[in-house]
Image (cartoon, helix red, strand yellow):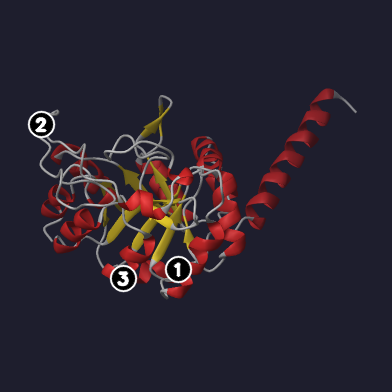
Amino acid sequence: MNKKNFFGILFLLFIALLVGLQLGARPAPTHPFFNNFDEYPIAFAHQGGNLLSPGNTIFAFERAVKMDVDILEMDAHITKDGVLVIIHDEDVDRTTNGTGLVEEMTLAEIKELDAGYWWTEDEGETYPYRGQGITIPTLDEVFKSFPGYPVNIEIKKTKNSIAQPLCEKIREYKMENKTLIASFSDERIIEFRKICPEIATSAAKNEITKFVILNYIFMGKLYSPTDVAFQVPESNSGILVVRPEFISGARNRNVQVHIWTPNTHEEIQKFIDMGIDGIMSDRPDILMKLLDR
C-alpha cells in the first residue's frame, strides 16, 4: 500500500469516527425548570443584588423580588451542626463582624453575626446596614420567605458535602421544578446529580471547558450535555467564552447560556443585544430597566 492510499484510508476512518460520534451525541433533555419563564433573557439577581445591599440576605432577596426578577441567585454552605446557610465565602470575615469558617461554626454562632456589617457603596466612608438586624439566612428561611420563587443555588466546594441535605430541602419544599443548581466543582455537581437527578443543573468548569474547545474547532455537536445551562463569565484566562457562536452552539445542544456578572448599562445591553439566555447581575435594577419590565 502506498502512502497516498494509507493516508486516504486514515482520513476516511477519521471522518467515519466523527460521524459516529455525532450520531451518538445527544442534546440535553428539556427541563421543566425553564417553563417558569415567558420572557428572555432571564433576569437573575446575583446574590439578590450585591451592589444594592448586603448580598445573600433576606433583605437583598426581598428587594429583588419587588423588582420582579426571574430568579434569586445564591450560594450555599453548611454549618458545623449541619444546617444549610446562604453565604458566598467559606468564612464569615469579609461580610460580617465575625471571623471563622462557616463549617466550623454552629447556626447559633452564625446567627449572632451582622451580615450587613461591611457592606458599603462609598469605599468605606459609610456602612449603612450595620446594626440593622441583617443576618446570614438559612435555606429554610429563603424557601419559607419566597415560596415557589425560582432560585439558582451554587454549591460551594465545602469540606463536607451538602448534596444530600440540599436535595432533601428542595424536595421538602417541593422546589424540584423551581431550582437550578450550579457549582464550579465538577466533583460536587456530579455528586449532586447522582443524588438528585430530577433537579436542573448547570455545567461545572471542566464540562464547560470541554464544550468551549469543541465549539472553537466546530465540533460542538459532539458534546452530549448532562446539564441544561452554561453559567459563565464573558472570558476566562484570556479566552473569549461568550460570543455568538458559543450561544448558538449551546442552543444546538439544548443548553442555555447565562452570563455573570455584567453590572453597567453598557455591559448589560451588550448581552441583551447578543441574545443571551440569562443575565446574572449585581444591579438587578439596571437589568430590569433595560429589559423594560
Q: Nearer the viewer, residue 181 or 21?
A: 181
Q: Is residue 132 left or right of residue 47?
A: left
Label 1 crowd (10 A; few <14 / some 14-19 / many >=20): some
Q: Which mark is residue 84?
A: none
Kind of residue at disc 1 = Ile
Q: Is residue 81 left or right of residue 264?
A: right
Kind of residue at disc 2 = Asp
- Residue 47's spot in the image, x, y percent? 28, 49
Decide: is 82 above or below 198.
Answer: above
Which quadrant of the figure has residue 44? bottom left
Name the residue carrying label 3: 144
Quadrant of the rendering where the N terminus is positioned: top right
Decide: is 125 above or below 83.
Answer: above
Farthest-out residue, right: 1
Answer whether residue 277 is visible to the viewer in this image.
no
Decide: is 78 above or below 234.
Answer: below
Name the residue carrying label 2: 122
Label 3 crowd (10 A; few <14 / some 14-19 / many >=20): few
- Between discs 2 and 1, the one toward the N terminus: 2
User: In what element is the residue under mark 1?
Assistant: helix
Name the residue carrying label 1: 170
User: In what element is the residue under mark 3?
Assistant: helix
Q: Nearer the viewer, residue 200 or 85?
A: 85
Which quadrant of the figure has residue 260? top left
Kind of residue at disc 3 = Lys
- Between discs 3 and 1, the one toward the N terminus: 3
Q: Residue at x 50, y 49 (%)?
A: 203
